[in-house]
Image: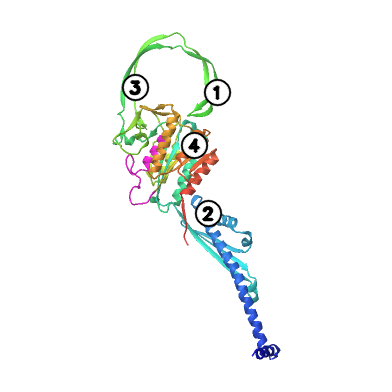
Amino acid sequence: MFFRKHAILKEFLATRSGAIAPLFALSILAMAGAVGLVVDGARMYSLKSHLQNSVDAAVLATARRAAIDPSADLTNVFTSFFNASTPAEHSSVIGSISVTKRGNLIDASVRADLPTTFMQLFGTSSVAIPASSSAEFGTGDLELVLALDNTASMAGSKIDTLKSAAKSLVDTLSRAATTPDKLRVGIVPFSKYVNVGLSNRSASWLDVANDWTETINWCGNTYPNERYTNCRNVTQACTIDGVPSSCTSQSCDYIPGPAVYQCQSYQAQHTWNGCVYSRSSPLNVTDGSYSSRIPGMMDEWCSQPLTPLTTDREKVRDAIEAMTPSGDTYIPEGVMWGWRLLSPQAPFDESRSGGSQRVGRYLVLMTDGVNSVSPTPTGHDGNDTTAANQLTLDACNNAKADGITIMAVAFQVTDTTIKNVLQTCASSGGFFYDAADSSQLIASFDSIGQQLVNLRIKK
């Protein structure tokens, strides 16, 4: 049997009929083609996978930019991000890029032309590899309160920068909101006190006296012939609202002249201008039990009235623009009134949280200095910075426990103690911003806007 098989093989190899050799050649070619398809197929799969990942990442970045800057060239934005995430060996085969915007939806598509290797044997020199993706941006149901330092140390360019940064943040979120009712914003300008607005004078949660007038009789020496001479400007180191500064004041030589004793009476007007101070401990850092009412502060000027949560973008912008710096810093009241605006109960009940609807609640707390006053039984006239810092932390912790996300911004703050307080106040996830100058303050508010804009791939 062995010799018979050997003979048959010898006969096959010796044949000259031409029927077997072509079949053998075709089989070899088919085998080579199959191997080529596997090799080229692996290259196609690798490119497709990397291409899709790059398109997904770039379209998300483009959607974020579109939410922040409606005038941005989205094709350039997408291309820049796409190129940065695409390996060099793949970027050389990109054929076309297309980016379009439909409302809050960004569509992007990319085509790569991959040169083949073995498939060229069959007349296919390249294969088109497409990848596409869509990303949608929006705010979801979002409630945001800006508790902004309006103290004297914010005067000048600092308050102007803050106004610009805050309005830009509001504009960013307003553009990103899929419908106007998705976004509600409130403003709490704070300094030594907070202004809750004269319209709340009769509110059940507020304890404030009626305005009244008293007659005061006074007797003593007057100096009708007093004079001031040799007046000059004097510059010296000073502290404005707890922030070291350089102050210029006028100094004169005083010549009182002869004293003249006299008596006189005058009318003293006692007025409530909307200012309130904190309740006694522990109610000063809690949101509730408003049968123990919030005390109003008579004869005191404070910042512009707060603005409860509203969908009215222009009203919010006007409130920001009206901010005027004055007074000392007491940060806990900024936190507390921000929390109260985000609470569905009194003093303000505009918040939609607390029900079945899922609402994101955020508080942006911004200050440029240290707590320069502390509570007393009749106001915020103490100087216990340590106590004020602890109350700041207590208020922040209680607000966070109630489900509020706090984003804290330190603006040109050099005191490490208050920086640590603000960093601890901030919720986890990189929500503390240390802005050393005006450009960094603007960048911080831009970053907050980016973090609050929800992005998702929608294929």
* Earlier residue among tags 1 and 4: 1
Front: mark 4 or 3: 4
Image point (47%, 31%), residue name: 152
- Tell me the mark number nearer the camera, choosing from 3 and 1: 1
Label 3 SS: strand
218 left or right of 237 in image? left
Tag of residue 31: none
Which mark is in front, 2 or 1?
2
Residue sitting at x 43%, y 9%: 259
Q: Is residue 35 inside the magenta stretch?
A: no
Give the residue pinned by disc 3.
268
Residue corresponding to mark 2? 61
Marks 4 and 3, how far apart at CA: 44 Å
Distance Cα–Cα, label 3 vs label 1: 35 Å
The amino acid pointed to by label 2 is: Ala
Residue placed most toward the observer, 402 or 368: 402
Lower position in the chain sequence, tag 2 or tag 4 = 2
